[in-house]
């Protein structure tokens, strides 16, 4: 007998559990789409062609936040003399 593929909801739930297990979280934010795309282009994080794809904007925004986290964690470690790290 053939197995049915998992439902869409089951696949989404599995991915969500995997992300949480890895310490990842998904946040819903609101931003002006065209201004965000323009800022990513001007900062050379995306090309004009890439900025037309929402998935690439979302990916790059996630990377930008990760960069910010790393910068501020390093700053906090230096400021605290390394005790908080």
Image (cartoon, rainbow, N blue to C red):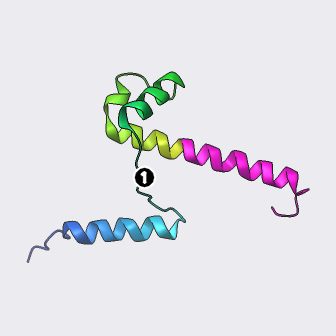
- In this orientation, which residue lies closer to the viewer: 27 or 63? 27
Left or right relative to 71: residue 30: left
Quadrant including the N terminus: bottom left
Picture layout, residue 43 above or below residue 32: above
- In this orientation, which residue lies closer to the viewer: 14 or 73? 73
**How many dots with numbers?**
1
Let me know if residue 84 is in the magenta part.
yes
Left or right relative to 69: residue 53: left
- In this orientation, which residue lies closer to the viewer: 79 or 15? 79
Instruction: Please state the horizontal and vertical placement of residue 68, each as a whole percent of the image.
Output: 63, 45
* Residue 23, picture quadrant: bottom right
Instruction: Please state the horizontal and vertical placement of residue 14, each as a whole percent of the image.
Output: 34, 70
Instruction: Please state the horizontal and vertical placement of residue 12, each as a whole percent of the image.
Output: 30, 66
Quadrant including the C terminus: bottom right
Left or right relative to 80: residue 8: left
Let me know if residue 45 is in the magenta part.
no
Picture layout, residue 40 above or below residue 8: above
Name the residue tied to disc 1.
Answer: 29
The local crowd at label 1, few if under 14, some if 14 to 19, many if 20 or more residues have their Cα within 10 Å, is few
- The magenta stretch is 64-85
Residue located at (44% from left, 58% from top):
27
Q: Residue furthest right?
A: 81
Residue located at (44% from left, 34% from top):
36
Instruction: Please state the horizontal and vertical placement of residue 2, each as a whole percent of the image.
Output: 10, 73
Picture layout, residue 22 above or below residue 72: below
Q: Main secondary structure of the magenta part?
A: helix
- At mark 1, the secondary structure is loop
Q: Residue furthest left?
A: 1
């Amino acid at each position: 007998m053939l197995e049915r593929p998992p439902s869409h909801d089951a696949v989404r739930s599995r991915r969500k559990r995997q992300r949480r297990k890895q310490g990842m979280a998904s946040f819903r934010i609101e931003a002006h789409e065209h201004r965000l795309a323009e800022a990513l282009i001007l900062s050379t994080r995306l090309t004009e062609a890439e900025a037309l794809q929402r998935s690439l904007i979302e990916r790059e925004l996630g990377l930008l936040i990760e960069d910010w986290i790393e910068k501020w964690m390093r700053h906090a470690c230096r400021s605290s003399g390394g005790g908080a790290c």
